[in-house]
Image: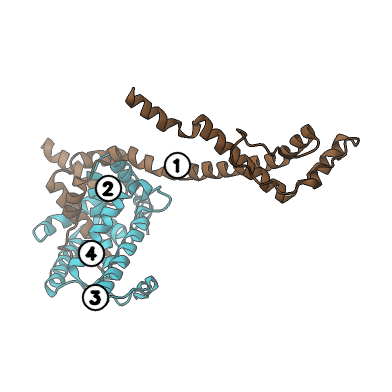
Amino acid sequence: MKKDNKNEQLKESLSAVMDGEANEDDLHDVLANFHNKKIQSVAKRYQLIGDVLRNNKTPPINIDLSDRVAEVINKQPNFAVTKSLIVHNNFQWMNHISKYAFAASFVLAVLVGAGIWKYNQPITTTYENNSILLSDAGADGYSPKVTYGEYEHVHEIPTAIDPQQQKQHVMRAIDKQVLKRFKAYSFQHAEEIDMKSMQGMLPFVRAVKFQLY
Amino acid sequence: MTKAPDTDNQLINRVKEGEKQAFDLLVIRYQYKILALVSNYIKNRNEVQDVAQETFIKAYRALNNFRGDSAFYTWLYRIAINTAKNHVISQQRKSLGVDIDIDETEHFDEDNLYEISTPEDILYKEEVKETIFNVINSLPDGLRTAITLREIDGLSYEEISDVMDCPVGTVRSRIFRARTAIDKALAALV
């Protein structure tokens, strides 16, 4: 008798669930017993009653997808377990954005650095030497020299004018050709320093030495 | 038409917590609607079932993307439409060996539905229908009114309680008793 009552209560809860009018207790009771094939059959018939009564264009009512879908879903990893992975995947776009942001920052830093270097470098050199912009000596005195071409127009920097005027004067003096020469010189200088100190080859040299000795 | 977003959302939350059986209930609730929807696009009975099944599986896999901003059925409906359209396009590519414009799949007319039922299906359906209506007509007035307002007019329990001037609990009980009576007759058929 008690069992019948419980069964009737369960079916009443199921009826409410199928109507979308269930409370948490109804849902809990139904889901706790939904492994029971009899309860599943009752649920399908309750749904069928509504679908037939509403007389919408119904598919063949002997088609039942629930078992097929359940079979596939039961092979899937548990939702609660995969949830953390999916949440992790949701934030992967941030990784992509951060990569692009880092690349953009790097490019920006290089551009700004180049701009600052371009602005500062000749002025300092010119103020210090007060005559020529660049030395024509190689880093070690014998390496091939960069051809500087003519730079007479930067020699004559007036010393009597105030620093601001000097700066403006020097800035006007630094044309593209001089800058190009300076870059060539810097590049060669860096190469020579690397070759001389072996800094550019350091990882290989260390590896060989480590293996040999 | 009353919808049931609360129960659906409750079920979805349960699925997200790892209770797979809650999704079985969602499948049972919406399988006929989805089958009917998919049969608007596909005329092969087996393909309709495959696409409807795929729809539910896609929905399950994407359930974390469902935020509950719209009703679950609305979301499921979109998945079903897209799955059916993709199926149609892939089938046409296979048979014609040409590219199909996705807009072409929009030209399906809902009045021109494919009938995927066999004559046996139609007979069976008629028999089920007749059984249901016979039982309803034999029900006491209160039960018949309650089940009719719920299933045919789509009113909520609260709306039915207003119409019938009785507590919501009574409405729930009457609907359940009406269903039980129909179910007894139907169990022999289905």
Q: Are marks 3 and 2 in contact (CB under 8 Å)?
A: no
Query: Is residue B177 shown to the viewer in this render?
Result: yes
Residue B167 in view in this figure: no
Pair 1/4: label in front? 1
**Residue pointed to by mark 3:** B95
Callouts 4 and 2 in the same chain:
yes
**Nearer the camera: disc 3 or disc 1:** 1
Residue at screen point 18% across, 44% down: A34
Residue at image location 62% in from the left, 40% down from the top = A186
Horizontal arrangement in the rendering, residue B117 relative to residue A151 (left or right): left
Q: Colour of chain B?
A: cyan
The answer to whether residue A196 is above or below residue A82 is above
The span from disc 1 to disc 4 (Cα, nearest Å) is 51 Å
Residue on which disc 2 sits? A17
The image's mark for residue B113 is none
Residues at discs 1 and 2 both on one chain: yes
Is there one chain holding both mark 3 and mark 4?
A: no
Residue farthest toward the top in the current orientation of the protein: A213
The quadrant holding residue A52 is bottom left
Indicate the amino acid at tag 4: Val
Nearest to N terminus: mark 1 or mark 2? 2
> Where does label 1 land, which residue?
A95
Chain letter corresponding to the colour brown: A
